[in-house]
Image: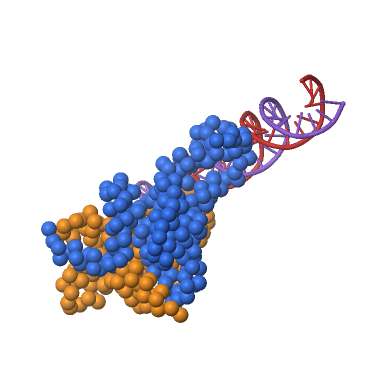
Chain colours: A blue, B orange, C red, D purple
Amino acid sequence: MSKMSQTEETRKNLIEAFWELYKEKPLMKITVKEITDKAGYNRGTFYTYFSDVYQIQDILKKSLIPEKDMILDPLMSLEKSGGEIFESFEKTNAYIQENSEKIAVMIGPEGDPSFVHEFKKEIREVIMSYVYEIGIKEPGKFEYIIEYEISALIGIFQLWMEKNEDMDEYALAELMEEVSNSGVTSMMESMLNDKA
Amino acid sequence: MSKMSQTEETRKNLIEAFWELYKEKPLMKITVKEITDKAGYNRGTFYTYFSDVYQIQDILKKSLIPEKDMILDPLMSLEKSGGEIFESFEKTNAYIQENSEKIAVMIGPEGDPSFVHEFKKEIREVIMSYVYEIGIKEPGKFEYIIEYEISALIGIFQLWMEKNEDMDEYALAELMEEVSNSGVTSMMESMLNDKA
DNA sequence: TAATATTGTACAACATGGTGTTGGATTAAA
DNA sequence: TTTAATCCAACACCATGTTGTACAATATTA
């Protein structure tokens, strides 16, 4: 690991201190003083690196918006429907591994709605551009279905985090797949008919 | 319409002024001065009615969390599956009619994640308590499916608002029902096979 | 390599603006 | 006229963002 310049180091320290606070409380209650105290700098120093607290938050948010590849790779291999499915999830998995804690905060009850909005928008747009290439009858309608699914999966994931991961991640993935395949209605009906 | 007491009047004016601002910009950029200027009072007056801006936001949020009836009525009639389906949606429809503008802001990109969280939680809990009475095998799993559906519907609704209601509300409702019945996967597949 | 100039980094001090409180003025009600 | 509710001006406090400066790191050149 190459040694950082002092600038990089300080910058990193400030972002890290901000993140520690952001995990615990909403942005509007975080002061510049708190950040610099935690990182061990003068309050003024903050402003040589960032214009305000929002900018730090913005940097964090942008670092969490997924790359096109992460969304497209799995999609492509789904289309081909053969070969190295798992390979194609490499980038996606790495991304989740790396960022799940931050994502959980961002989509959580004290999180950031504009992040969720951007996040969904990015995924929708990448998928839509792919779909246009393939050719499709009702792109408008299709976009709503994508939105439906993304929102649903984010919701499930958030609840799962909130419940402290009460099932293992494979069970969760399986559940997601099951609902997406069968639809909510039939899932519910079958569970209700099949009473305790 | 009965005449309000001065207190009620002022209170209402302040909440209304806050709302006008909240539609336009995030909470953290709204000052007490702005609110009282808009409503035509001294800044100090604000504090005889509210302890801070968060409290006003909280009041607004609480007024938007649906009553149990609104969630249960449609559910019950679904179970019975006969008679006055439309009757049972009366309260729900009235609620949406009355509050759609506010809800749109709250679930929008500059909205309030804690509202969305509370909103979904309330609906989940009401449904779950109903489901427990009926009896069911895997309540844990069932709750995730509810979450999936609520999140999905909120997501679609939000996108629809953002796209300035590009289809009429019946088409939207139909789309929602269709996806919920068939599942996302088969919907997408059929649209892809059925190319332009 | 040593001396010196230059740039980068951190800080203390300041002006400004928002917060929440208090005590008194004004208005309405009893 | 007395009492109580409502509103407001003034105050102390705290966070913000800016500026000028000291100090440290790095580059230049002799």
Residue B66 seen from this side: no
Horizontal and vertical percent position of residue A178: 28, 62
**Quadrant where the C terminus of chain A is found in the figure:** bottom left
Which residue corresponds to the image point at 28% horizontal and 53% vertical from the top-left? A171
User: Is any atom of residue A67 visible in this view?
Assistant: yes
Q: Identify the image quadrant of residue A50.
A: top right
Q: Nearer the viewer, residue C15 or A20?
A: A20
Q: Residue at x 62, y 34 (%)?
A: A6
Please determine whether, in this image, residue B174 is positioned above or below residue B11. below
Classify residue C23 as left or right of residue D30.
left
Place of residue B179 in the rendered image (x, y in percent of width and height, measured from the top left): 33, 71
Of residues A118 and A124, the one drawn nearer to the viewer in this rendering: A124
Instruction: Point out the residue furthest to the left here.
Output: A196
Q: Is residue A43 above or below residue A116?
A: above
Q: Within the image, what quadrant is residue C9 found in?
A: top right
Q: Residue at x 42, y 51 (%)?
A: A93
Percent across and percent down for residue C21 are 44, 40
Residue pushed farthest front? A83
Given residues A96 and B124, the one toward you in this image is A96
Quarter of image, res B143 = bottom left
Q: Residue at x 39, y 69 (%)?
A: A145
In this rendering, position of residue B31 left or right of residue A97: right
**x then y, percent, for residue B175:** 35, 74
If the image is split into quadrants, where does the N terminus of chain A sit? top right
